[in-house]
Image (spheres, grey):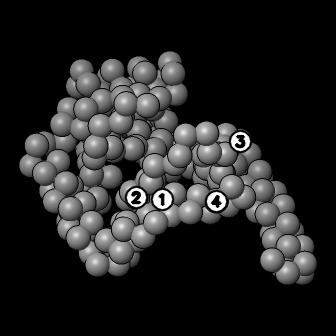
């Protein structure tokens, strides 16, 4: 990387964090989210089912919760998500990436270990990943967890490549703090069982 580019990147990084510190300060955050908080307070329809209550309890207690996906969405919706995944894996460009030997980087700042499967299309409310992200049960959990109506930020779908044991952690594999928002809830769906 050129020296001037390094300087620019450092300044940009510093300014980005300063902006987020101001944007996420409590007074500014309360001001920018006042409508979602007021609408939520005035809505009395916050009836969660048993699995939603369990997820909410675990989120509040541990900051993380686990559930089987079919406890949240229907078997048909789960099959649609799986079908979409299979169709993306059959895409020639993605198949080529998956079949290319990967060299594990020790100084990488990018997520070289993830292959992005998401097709870059406009927001489609009928798209399986959008339907998952905007599922009413998930939105209800998020809203009650945050005491406000939440904002949808987007979806991603990756294949995470196995990293050799003992490899140095890089990028988001290291402990880090996202600067997305003061409060947020992310959902992760594993299409294959993960034991560790």
Q: Mark number for residue 114?
A: 1
Q: Which residue is situated farthest in the left direction here?
A: 76
Tell me the residue at 24%/21% (across/down): 50
Question: In the visual, does 124 lie left or right of 10?
Answer: left
The answer for how far apart the CA atoms under marks 1 and 2 are is: 6 Å
Whether residue 34 is visible here, answered yes or no, is no
The answer for how far apart the CA atoms under marks 1 and 3 are is: 34 Å
C-beta proximity under 8 Å, tags 2 and 3: no
Q: Secondary structure at mark 1?
A: strand
C-beta proximity under 8 Å, tags 4 and 3: no
Q: Mark number for residue 26?
A: 3
Q: Quadrant of the N terminus?
A: bottom right
Q: Secondary structure at mark 4?
A: loop
Nearer the N terminus, badge 2 or badge 3? 3
* Percent of width and height locating residue 174: 66, 43
Q: Which residue is mark 2?
A: 158
C-beta proximity under 8 Å, tags 1 and 2: yes
* Residue 2 against residue 161 in the figure, above or below: below
Tell me the residue at 64%/59% (across/down): 105
Q: Residues within 10 Å of mark 1 (few under 14, many from 20)?
A: few
Tell me the residue at 46%/49% (across/down): 162
Tell me the residue at 72%/58% (across/down): 107
Nearer the N terminus, badge 4 or badge 1? 4
Nearer the N terminus, badge 1 or badge 2? 1
* Percent of width and height locating residue 119: 34, 73
């Amino acid at each position: 990387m050129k020296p001037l580019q390094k300087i620019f990147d450092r300044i940009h990084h510093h300014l980005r964090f300063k902006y987020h510190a101001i944007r996420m300060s409590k007074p500014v955050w309360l001001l920018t989210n006042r409508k979602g908080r007021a609408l939520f307070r005035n809505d009395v329809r916050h009836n969660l089912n048993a699995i939603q209550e369990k997820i909410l309890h675990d989120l509040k207690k541990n900051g993380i919760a686990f559930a089987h996906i079919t406890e949240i969405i229907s078997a048909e919706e789960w099959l649609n998500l799986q079908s979409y995944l299979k169709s993306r894996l059959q895409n020639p460009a993605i198949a080529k990436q998956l079949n290319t030997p990967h060299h594990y980087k020790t100084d990488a700042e990018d997520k070289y270990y993830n292959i992005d499967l998401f097709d870059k299309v406009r927001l489609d409310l009928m798209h399986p990943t959008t339907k998952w992200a905007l599922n009413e049960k998930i939105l209800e959990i998020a809203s009650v967890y945050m005491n406000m109506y939440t904002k949808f930020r987007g979806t991603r779908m990756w294949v995470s490549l196995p990293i050799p044991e003992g490899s140095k952690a890089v990028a988001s594999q290291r402990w880090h703090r996202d600067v997305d928002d003061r409060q947020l809830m992310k959902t992760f769906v594993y299409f294959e069982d993960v034991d560790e």
